[in-house]
Image (cartoon, grey):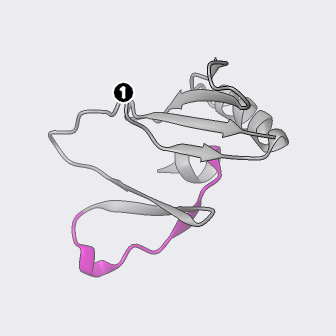
Amino acid sequence: MRFYAEVVGLERIERPESMGGVGVWFRAGSQELHVSEYEQFVPAAKAHPAFELGAAELDALARRLGAAGAEVRWDERLPGARRFYSFDPAGNRLEFLSRQ
């Protein structure tokens, strides 16, 4: 989960013990991302969360991801936004965008 905390920069929050199992929770602004592991896992290659950032934050994140060896795939198809896709170590697609 180092990827989400240290590379992406999400705040790790406490996962209630009552939830059982294995997993880590993160805060992204007013949203939460809950990440779990299980044996029959299939990465989400198309469906994905999108995280909106300021323009400078978007560029800094793209550099951090690239430096960490993660793919940074820019996509210009969304009018009024700069955005790119990346993938977490498990292969899940993530979108990062700025509308500024």
Residue tagged by mark 1?
A: 45
Q: Is residue 54 left or right of residue 77?
A: right
Name the residue rendered at 24%, 33% in the picture: 42
Q: Is residue 53 left or right of residue 13?
A: right
Name the residue rendered at 55%, 35% in the picture: 95
Looking at this view, is 5 or 86 the one in front?
86
First to last magenta residue range: 7-21
Visible in this render: residue 35?
Answer: yes
Looking at this view, is 65 or 84 the one in front?
84
Residue type for callout 1: Ala
- 90 drawn magenta: no
Q: Is residue 15 left or right of residue 73?
A: left
Name the residue rendered at 60%, 56% in the picture: 10
Q: Is residue 84 left or right of residue 81?
A: left
Image: 32 above or below 49: below
Looking at this view, is 28 or 80 the one in front?
80
Considering every residue shown, the one lying at the far front of the view is 79
Image mark count:
1
The image quadrant where one finds the C terminus is top right
- Give the percent coordinates (x, y) of residue 99: 74, 39
- Give the percent coordinates (x, y) of residue 8: 62, 45
Image: 91 above or below 14: above
